[in-house]
Amino acid sequence: MSGKGGVGKTLIAGGLAASLVKRGFKVLAIDADPSPNLALMLGLKASEAVKIKPISEDKDLIQRKTYTGYPGIYRLQFRVDDIVEEYAVDTPLGVSLLVMGTVKGAEGGCTCPANALLRVLMRHLVVERGEAVVMDMEAGVEHLGRGTAKHVDYMLIVSEPSYRSLSTALKIHELSKSLGIPNIQAVGNKVSGPGDEAAIRKFFSEAGIPLIGLIPFDEAVVEAERAGSTPLLLSNKSRAVASIEALAEKLVGKIEKTA
């Protein structure tokens, strides 16, 4: 899940993850946004969410995995499967959550041990684990890297009907293509009426980017977030959440056809 900041990536990522759990999948959600909020969206309380330390900030873990004893030299090969077992957090919606923190550097050139650890871990999560993985990422996809990106089933680019948001979506699409991601599709969010829908459809049609779904603007989402809760746990399902569940069903159908 990628897109400009504030377009609603976290709502859609959390909604997709929760929907996949309902469909019988074992789901791992990864928060790779610099300002992580996926824990709250998945139903954890603020007091619980603040206790989750991003892996990128865990100096003890990074040293334990990469340290060689020689200044400026660190390991590039190390096991990371134990990190998931130790650091993944269970959420009220049945989704396991891993807070990664920021991941930078796709093609090398970055010799930071923290980023080396995150790149190895990201590849392990996408390539080797037999479960559904949903990533909520920062704008841009450089941090996936070519070795990981080619194993991603879908890159969903979320955009709201504003020029800046749509322009950012176009840039992310170009970068995703350069990384070799096979399926790149757009999701229109916060669609408040026919004018918004028409603008989104026109932009992505002219850009040649498939549009896989539209999520309506929903005051229930705003009210839930204002109250410090998640719209995914509302007793009366909101229109936005219902649309995200329909998106999840569509994605599962597409992946099953190509499996």
Image (cartoon, rainbow, N blue to C red):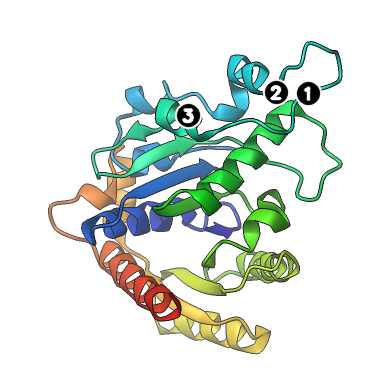
- In the picture of the structure, the residue carrying the numbered disc 1 is 74
- In the picture of the structure, the residue carrying the numbered disc 3 is 82
Q: Amino acid at mark 3?
A: Asp
Density class for disc 2 (Cα within 10 Å; few <14, some 14-19, many ≥20) is some
Residue 101 in picture, x, y percent from top left: 58, 35
Density class for disc 1 (Cα within 10 Å; few <14, some 14-19, many ≥20) is some
How far is mark 1 from mark 3, CA to CA?
19 Å
Residue 196 visible in this rendered orientation of the protein: no
How far is mark 2 from mark 1, CA to CA?
5 Å
How far is mark 3 from mark 2, CA to CA?
14 Å
Asked which quadrant contains residue 51, the reply is top left
Dot placed on the residue nearer the N-terminal end, 3 or 2: 2
| Disc 2 element | helix
Q: Amino acid at mark 2?
A: Thr
Observer-nearest of 83 and 175? 83
Q: Amino acid at mark 1?
A: Tyr
Density class for disc 3 (Cα within 10 Å; few <14, some 14-19, many ≥20) is few
- In the picture of the structure, the residue carrying the numbered disc 2 is 66
Above/below status of 41 relative to 257: above
Observer-nearest of 130 and 43? 130
Above/below status of 224 relative to 179: above
Above/below status of 121 relative to 240: above
Residue 174 in picture, x, y percent from top left: 73, 70
Q: Are marks 2 and 1 in contact (CB under 8 Å)?
A: yes
Residue 39 in picture, x, y percent from top left: 38, 37
Residue in the image at 66% along x and 32% along y: 117
Observer-nearest of 98 and 259? 259
Dot placed on the residue nearer the N-terminal end, 1 or 3: 1
Asked which quadrant contains residue 243, the reply is bottom left
| Disc 3 element | helix
Residue 105 in picture, x, y percent from top left: 76, 44
